[in-house]
Image (cartoon, helix red, strand yellow):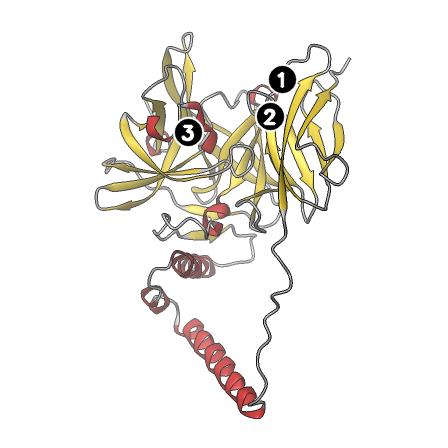
Amino acid sequence: MNTGLENSVVLITSTKKDNVIGTGFAIHRDQDQTYLVTCAHVIKDVGGEDSVLVNGIPAKVLALGDVQGFDLAILQAEGLSNLPLLHLITLSGEEKRTIKIAGYYLYSGNKQHSCKTIEGICSETGEVVQLIEKSLERAAVLELRMSQENQLQAGYSGSPVIDQETSRVLGVVTHMEKEGKIGRAISIAALLKIREMPSLSFPLEVSMASTGDGSQSSSNLNARIKTVETHIFSGTKVLEEIKKLPSWVKAIFAFIIMVSGVSGWDYIQANPNESVQVNQDSPDLEYQRIGVTVRNRENAQPVENVTVQIIFDGPPVQKMTDRNGYFEIEVPARETAQVTLTKAGFKTATETVGLKVDPDKTKLIYLDPEN
């Protein structure tokens, strides 16, 4: 019999392909429309945006991230009114959390599917993924370590990572390593940072994970402030959400606005002839897309699911090679990036990539198997 958590996830399948599955979960409902989260690579694996089924129901893809980086997708499906909505929470720093993950997998020669809940530990890795190309918006990468006999399986991509203490979603499973004993997930905080996707107009409430010195009331307050932030980003009205905040918070907002307005007016009066200069001499930074293929040096075969860390500005950005051993990177045209590739069974490789050192827009990197 399914547990409550297993009843909260959906099976994602294809209208075109057999034996290709993924997992998703619901985060919002508006009348008869349900909004769900899964992985971008699940959408690709099932055959693209026009091939997605959620529990057998056709789904519309509202937002689709980068398979090699921000590997998330937002879906919209009609119905699913009995599907529970999962609530969201973000980690604070690199603290470890005890987690549960419910996901679908195939068995009996990949002809049957089932759903199972597994347990483990979750923590931030210190790595990030870039949310939107040519932007500074990034989200944390979470490391998943499964306990005892538990292991991730093919099909768990898109599964919610549930914090056992709060029963809220910390992240979304994206990859597995070492036969499913270790996995990777993207922090759920990424959903709050997607400001350039206008289709995401519904509010999201995200709490901060308590570190032991915060009260439940402050957590609820943070969730409301986050809801206000999301409304602002999506262009919807925010006054109703501000009204829900405690009086002292509204007083601080009013004070800040008043002081800013008065200070600005005083400055204008004191400097009537001074105009604001806008710097138009700095053109947008030009980025160059570079494609990289990773192969096994011994047999020249592509190597998939290689963890790729890219460093050229700020914290490392993480990507994964696809089934063809391929990934793409965008580097400022006059800069270089350090790329480190790791995969179990292979020696770690580090390369410098960029038009500054190599004018070719495609690059081939070989990994040496460990002896």
Spot occupied by residue 310 in the image (x, y as percentages of width and height): 67, 38
Picture quadrant of residue 343: top right
Amino acid beneath label 2: Tyr
- Residue at the extreme bottom of the image, as rendered: 270
For residue 148, side relative to residue 47 (left or right): right
Q: Circle 3: is it few (<14), some (14-19), or many (20+) Cα within 10 Å?
A: many
Q: Earlier in the sequence, mark 1 or mark 3?
A: 3
Residue visible at 51% across and 80% down? Answer: 260
Amino acid beneath label 1: Pro
Quadrant placement of the C terminus: top right
Give the answer, above or below, for where 255 lies relative to 50. Answer: below
Q: Earlier in the sequence, mark 1 or mark 2?
A: 1
Quadrant placement of the N terminus: top left
Mark seen at residue 302: 1
Q: Are marks 2 and 3 in contact (CB under 8 Å)?
A: no
Q: Secondary structure at mark 2?
A: strand
Mark 2 vs mark 3: give the one in front: 2
Q: Circle 1: is it few (<14), some (14-19), or many (20+) Cα within 10 Å?
A: some
Q: Nearer the viewer, residue 293 or 280?
A: 280
Q: Are marks 1 and 2 in contact (CB under 8 Å)?
A: yes
Q: Earlier in the sequence, mark 2 or mark 3?
A: 3
Residue pointed to by mark 3: 43
Spot occupied by residue 238 in the image (x, y as percentages of width and height): 35, 64
Q: CA distance from mark 1 to mark 2?
A: 8 Å
Residue pointed to by mark 2: 326
Give the answer, above or below, for where 253 lies relative to 46. Answer: below
